[in-house]
Image: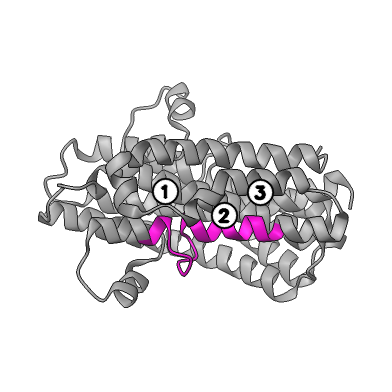
Amino acid sequence: MLGRTAASLFWMSRYMERAENIARLTEVGYRSALTPNSGGGHREDWRSILVAAGCLDAFEAKKRPATPEAIRAFLLLDRDHPSSVRSCVEIARNNARSVRTALTSEMWEALNSTWNELADLQPERIGPARLPEFLDWVRQRSAMFRGATIGTLLRTEGFHFSQIGAFLERADNTARILKMKYAVLLPGTGSSDRNAYQWETILRSVSAHRSYRHFFQEAYRPNNIAEFLILRQEMPRSLRYCTDQVQASLASLVELTERGQMGLALAGARYGKLAQVQIDALLRDGLGAFLDQFIIDTAEMAEAVADEFHFV
């Protein structure tokens, strides 16, 4: 497979995953802003979302007041912001169009129809009353594309480049959500109503609210939430699950192409420690530092894959 084809498939899936993740981060901001006695207020809640998404500088460069409405418009529909939901879907579609013959018709239809519905949507049509409905729609469309990919694409090189892109992006997003809220997961945070609401918000932001209850069958406990979203292989948005999927697809690429050994070794070195770490030790020794390093490792992992497979 040509490097530019592999790159297009990688970025197609990565940007569709990012569109969903930006919607999830926006929901965190929306829910946090509704929390009673929310400390710094709406401004700080939404500012933290910009920090988590890695786009605070880009927003501030626009010289706009940091109102909830302006931040939502920036995250969701800004044509000039490359990580807005609108831009992510457009970039994903452009990558898909450039490798149209490598996709199934179901994948293309899922992506193209999403873009057609989104292209002309105006910010005033997703005010606070309609915001939850729009965010649900983004998640549903992302799930449709993901389902088409998993259900119809041959397990050849293209599938694995697509998977690596999607799971690197998902791992990065989960780490960023945890980084944004990690203070309420540390020992000694207590069980106040506000902390309980924040714990629930973290779980809802990664669609883990019901599955947490099923898995632990008890009330929210911060160490359990951290373990569930970092170490549990059963949780499809946990750091462990995502990195296992990246390593599995890299191993498949080594078998299929006899290339990728360096990327696979790097993934094992960077992510292998997740199989041994204990959550109590992680919380005690520094969750924030761990998440910072994980985000760096994930970015470097993407660069390593691009270099080894000659993305252009």
The spot of residue 15 in percent (x, y) is 62, 49
Amino acid carrying mark 2 in the image: Thr
Which residue of the protein is positioned furthest toward the front in this rendering?
276
Q: Is residue 236 visible?
A: yes
Q: Earlier in the sequence, mark 1 or mark 3?
A: 3
At a point 32% along the width and 48% down the height, the residue shown is 281
- In front: label 3 or label 2: 2
Q: Which residue is mark 3?
A: 90
Amino acid carrying mark 1 in the image: Glu
Q: Which residue is mark 1?
A: 124
Q: Earlier in the sequence, mark 2 or mark 1?
A: 1
- Per the image, label 3 sits on a secondary structure element best described as helix
At a point 14% along the width and 52% down the height, the residue shown is 194
Q: Which part of the image, by quadrant, shows the C terminus?
A: top right
Q: Which residue is mark 2?
A: 243
The spot of residue 195 in percent (x, y) is 17, 52
Q: Is 157 covered by the magenta stretch?
A: no
Question: Is 266 or 121 nearer to us in this picture?
Answer: 266
Amino acid carrying mark 3 in the image: Glu
Q: Viewed as shown, does residue 17 lie left or right of 278?
A: right
Disc 2 to disc 1: CB gap under 8 Å: no
Prevalent SS, magenta region: helix
The spot of residue 88 in percent (x, y) is 60, 47
Q: CA distance from mark 2 to mark 1?
A: 38 Å
Rate crowding at label 2 as few (under 14), some (14 to 19) or many (20 or more) other CA atoms within 10 Å. many
Q: Is residue 130 visible?
A: no
Rate crowding at label 1 as few (under 14), some (14 to 19) or many (20 or more) other CA atoms within 10 Å. few
Q: Viewed as shown, does residue 9 lie left or right of 231?
A: right
Q: Viewed as shown, does residue 266 lie left or right of 105?
A: left
Disc 3 to disc 2: CB gap under 8 Å: no
Magenta stretch, residue numbers: 228-249
